[in-house]
Amino acid sequence: MSAPNGVRSVTGEIATSLPGVTFGSSFAKLAKRANKHAVVRSYVPGSEISNHVISPIVHHKETAGACLGAIYSRMAGMTNPANGMPTNAALFPPSVDARCKPVRFDFGNFLATGPVGSAFAPFVPGGGKTSAA
């Protein structure tokens, strides 16, 4: 691999369907279909350019108030048909270790479903203790 340390994939490199373009080897299926994708290497979320906000993930205008997981789940289905796993999940630190700090929602609500509806809300392990209220 020709990319410098810290930039290249730890899983190695795989050729794509586009000459001279490579992906990390964990993206083998995407690499086969690279000629059908547009890879966006930068994104400017509204007017919050320098604030490093999460508005591409949850934003009242850009995602209609829904987290991207809810939007994806609405498009792909609530579960993966091959294995039954939810297509939208949110794993918060307290779900793994009760000693972790409480979940913060002051920078965005990763549980928001906006107009796609609550049926597409993320699966939250230990979810009874996590809310945006």
Image: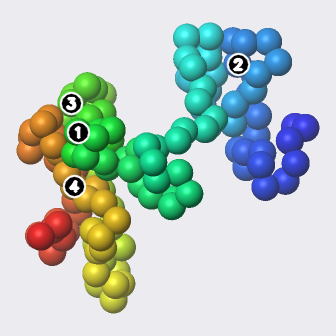
Q: Quick one: label 1 or label 2, which is nearer the N terminus?
A: 2
Residue displayed at 73% across by 45% down: 9
Image quadrant holding the C terminus, namely: bottom left
Left-right relation of 80 to 17:
left
Q: Quadrant of residue 128?
A: bottom left
Say few, some or many: other residues with alpha carbon within 10 Å of mark 4 (under 14 / 14 to 19 / 20 or more): many
Say which element carries label 3. Answer: helix
Nearer to us of marks 1 and 2 is 1
Say few, some or many: other residues with alpha carbon within 10 Å of mark 3 (under 14 / 14 to 19 / 20 or more): some
**For residue 38, above or below residue 64:** above
Residue displayed at 28% across by 26% down: 76
Q: Quick one: label 3 or label 4, which is nearer the N terminus?
A: 3
Q: Quadrant of residue 29?
A: top right
Amino acid type shown at disc 2: Thr
Structural distance between the alpha carbons of marks 3 and 1: 13 Å
Say which element carries label 1. Answer: loop
**For residue 133, above or below residue 37:** below
Residue displayed at 73% across by 49% down: 10
**For residue 119, above or below residue 54:** above
**For residue 63, above or below residue 102:** above
Q: How many marks?
A: 4
